[in-house]
Structures are given as structure tokens and as C-alpha cells.
Amino acid sequence: MAKYSREFVIPYYECNKTGLVRPASILAYMAEVSTLQSDFLGVGIVELLNNNQAWMLNRWRLKFLKYPKAQERIKVETWCSSIDRFYALREFAVYNESGEKIIKASTQWVLVDTLKKRPKRVPQDMIEIYGSISEKHFDDFYDFRADFDTDMENAEDFHVRKSDIDCNNHVNNVKYLGWIVEPIPLEIDENNLLSELEIMYKKQIKYGELICSSYTKIEEENTFLHKISNGEEVNALGKTKWMKK
């Protein structure tokens, strides 16, 4: 299957006070394009649910090379780079009106049996439908295992709202980014832009739960580790890197 793309015009309400698009909006565009491609191929959400299947996002890795602005037209492109047993890797690229690549991302997905609540081997016919293009943006994802028990120095609590729940009846993956960056000090957010992001999803979060978003700075310049937890359970881990405006 060839690469799949859609164009978007960035609305003002998806931008910050300086007119640049919010990172969470870019993740939402990417998620939308991946869903549209699956629909186009006949293996979308409806077809998956009819077969008691669902794709669960496991990892994000994303790098901003340049931020698009309000009312700018962008093209979001996606393709499958590999499928191996239970996992699929999906790549994304965002281009500006001049055709310049300004954002790149890699994601890892797991096919789940919705009745048995466990991973399921990707069927051969689905592998053939998606096909694969061996073009990847990154060699690997960040290894969070070494930092899993890192003590977090700063934290903020959130209640999961109804508006956080998506059509799959769980917290939308994009919401995690908002929770991750919210506790970051205002002076960092005012003087920097998020340049690199990684998120690893571990446990689902349900409506009404109280979650804690915490972070700590590590030795790498302008880099933070993040943890989202619900009591004793870790729901997601993250890493962000920031660059001066």
C-alpha cells in the first residue's frame, strides 16, 4: 500500500498565544489520518469491532523540526513501516505549504482481542492490506526501564472527565500529552518549545479516576522524564525535550 495523506488548515483555536499550533493538536491530526487510512482500506474501527479487535497505541516518538502557524495548510502523511506478530509500526510526516518536512513521528501499535483483553497476532490478510514501506524516522524508542523507579520531584493531580473519553470508551491517547506537560513550570513553557516527545502507554485510565502527573529533570539539557499514575499503578511514562524559542 502506498503512503496515505490528508491536508488540514490549522484553526486559531488549536494554537497557543503566539499563534503556533499546540503539540497535542498535531498528535490528534496524526491519529485522525491513521484512522482515515484504515477506513479507506476497509479495516477501520467498525470492521475491527465487528471482529472483536482493536488497535491499541503503545508508543509515540515525535520530533518537531519547525512549528506550523494558525491558518497554515499542512499535509499529514502516514504509512506502515513493519508488522511483526502482535505489533505494527506506523510512521508520520508533516509537511508545510512549501513541501518541507517539519514534523516526524513513529508509533507502535498492538492488536488486541477485545473479548479476551489480550494481544492478538495480526492476521495475514490484514498484513497484506496495509503492506509496509521500510522507511523509518527513528531506529528505536527510548528505554524507560532504567528510569522506571526514578523519583519524581513535581506533581499535579487531575480527575478524568467525560470529555477525555473517546469513541473507543477509554481516555484518548492525545489527552496524556496535556497531562504530561501541564505541571512543567510556566517559565519553561513561556521561553521554550517542545522539540522532542516520547510516550509509552502502560495501563488504561477510566472515567472518574484521579491521576497524578509528575516529572523530574534529568542531566540531558532541557529534558524531563514524566510519569502518569493512578495510586500504585503506573499508567504512562514520558520524556520531553525543550528548545529555546
Image (cartoon, rainbow, N blue to C red):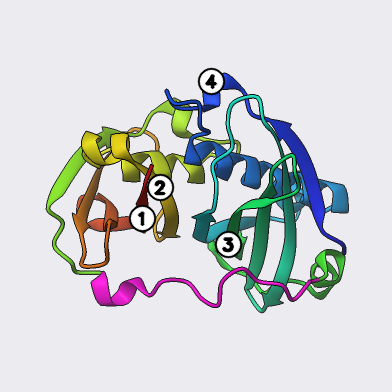
Query: Which residue, as the protein is rendered here, is positioned at the far top?
Result: 13
Query: How many angstroms separate mark 1 from mark 2 (CA)?
Result: 7 Å
Residue at label 1?
240
Mark on residue 8? none
Instruction: Determine the residue positioned at 57% across, 57% down.
Output: 56
Q: Residues under labels 3 and 1: Cα distance?
A: 16 Å
Is residue 142 within the magenta segment?
A: yes
Q: Is residue 148 left or right of residue 94?
A: left
Bin the neighbour count of mark 2 within 10 Å (Cα to Cα): few under 14, some 14-19, many 20 and up.
Answer: many
Whether residues under marks 2 and 4 lie with C-beta atoms below 8 angstroms apart, the answer is no
| Precedes in sequence: disc 1 or disc 2 | 2
The number of discs equals: 4
| The disc label shown at residue 107, or none | 3
CA distance separating discs 1 and 4:
24 Å
Q: What stretch is highlighted in magenta?
A: 132-147
Q: Residues within 10 Å of mark 4 (few under 14, many from 20)?
A: few
> Which residue, given by chain and number where applicable, does mark 2 sit on?
194
The local secondary structure at tag 1 comes to: strand
Q: How far apart are marks 3 and 2 (CA)?
A: 18 Å
- For the residues carrying marks 3 and 2, which lies nearer the camera in this image? 2
Q: In which quarter of the image is residue 107?
A: bottom right
Q: Left or right: where does residue 20 sit relative to residue 74?
A: left
Q: Are marks 1 and 2 in contact (CB under 8 Å)?
A: yes
From the viewer's perspective, is 126 left or right of 53? right
